[in-house]
Amino acid sequence: MVIFLSLLLIAALAALWLHVSKTRRFVRELEDAVRLNRRLLVHESSAALKRLGFESLVRETNDLIDRYRHHADSETGDYNQLEATLGSIQEAVIIFNDQHVIEFVNESAQRLFQRGRILKGRRLESALRSSSLLEFLDAYHDDKSLQLQQVSVEHQDELLWFEATCAEVRGVSGARSVSTLLVLHDITRLKSLEMVRRDFVANVSHELRTPLTIIKGFAETLVEDNATLPVETRARFLDKIVNNAQRLHVLVEDLLVLSRLESKPEQIAPSVQSLKLLFEETLENYRSRLNPEAQAVVLDFDARVGEFAFDRFRIHQVVDNLVENVFRYAPDFTRLTLSARYDEGSHLVECTVADDGPGIPEKDVPHIFERFYRADKGRSRESGGTGLGLSIMKHIVLQHGGSVSAESEPGKGTAIHFSLPYVQSTSENSATQGALDGQNAV
């Protein structure tokens, strides 16, 4: 009897151990299925699962996993569709939730603002430094009818301008959540052009006002006091009127030239010719203004530079303007040098007009090619300068495919550099100009 009971107890313990072992294995399989989001495929038969009481649990677990995978596939499909739709848009598109955490950015926004870091998952305030944008978003939160507003964003020590619009959309993270879609249209270049236009109008108005005021004042005086004015005074007044009329004429002509160069209705007309001969002819026109005892003109021309293609009329404008500036603004120079060197690496002819005059202050050098910029404003106007010469020169050289630069040191002189492509046939020059125009158009 004792032996029978012992055997029965051992059998019961063995059955219990087997049941526990199967339960543990089932729990492990259940854990793996949930973790890996895959259906639960158990090794036990349906009858065994039914005896263990796990049949309904397996069925419900598999249904739950199926629903989750369907939802995940749907969310992934929606996100991919969203990315495909908004990814190719040129405007920067950002979607963020009610906590201002970024949920989606398109390629344009990532390229514009990333600074080497991923934007998704960051707060909008840390990704875009802009108080005006936050004010716009606050205003939109209060008034959903708000459509469009210009905002500025600080980015890498630069101020970018955008037209901002936003709208509420279904959240990326969940079907019941609501997010905000922000679209930023870059208008930085338009803002810059608008500023240039305002400055240009202000500068032109200022430049025109001075000679017009002088002409008007002297003309009114001649009309009102003609009978009492001495002959010498009338002659002096008329001389002032003529000089300022000539100043207006030169200014208007320079403005027209600059306008034509900038709008490019006139293409340059290159032909193969000698730059050295052009330098010599330009200098010959100024020899009568030299003081032979105190001033010297030097032509330093690289023998490797032969004839090549350029627009003679336009390049003569460039060289003549630079030499005239030396005589106008550095009349006490002792040495004026015109040089040309061939750079084999870049295939450019590097030209320089240098003097040993008073030079230009360091702060003014970066600005001398800007329209109406004068290092010495009073002296420039007295000498008849319009402030457009170097700007015209810059545009001519750029249209040839070259570049301009300047260096100067007060008390030691100034050197203006410009480069021209060393193209030895007009067909090559046309191809080069076409490529350059294509780059400028982009």
Image: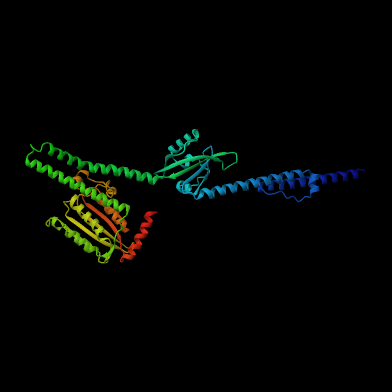
Give the image location of residue 304, x and y in percent: 27, 66
Q: Is 292 in front, or is 386?
A: 386
Give the residue at x 80% y 45%: 50
Where 284 sits versus 14, above or below? below
Residue furthest out toward the right: 1
Question: Height in image: 270 above or below 142?
Answer: below
What residue lies at 45% left-to-right and 35% top-to-bottom? Answer: 135
Q: Is residue 56 left or right of residue 114?
A: right
Q: Which quadrant does the N terminus fall into? A: top right
In this view of the protein, which residue sits in the foreground, 101 or 324? 324
Query: Is residue 269 left or right of 383 when viewed as pictured?
Result: right
From where the camera sits, is residue 135 visible?
yes
Location of residue 279 in the rendering, given as x and y in whole percent from the top left corner: 21, 61
Residue at 68% x, 47% y is 66
Q: Quick check: 127 above or below 312?
A: above
Q: For this rendering, which residue is in front, 142 or 37?
A: 142
Quarter residue 282 falls in: bottom left
- Front residue (pair 409, 207): 207
Residue 329 x, y percent position in the rendering: 19, 49
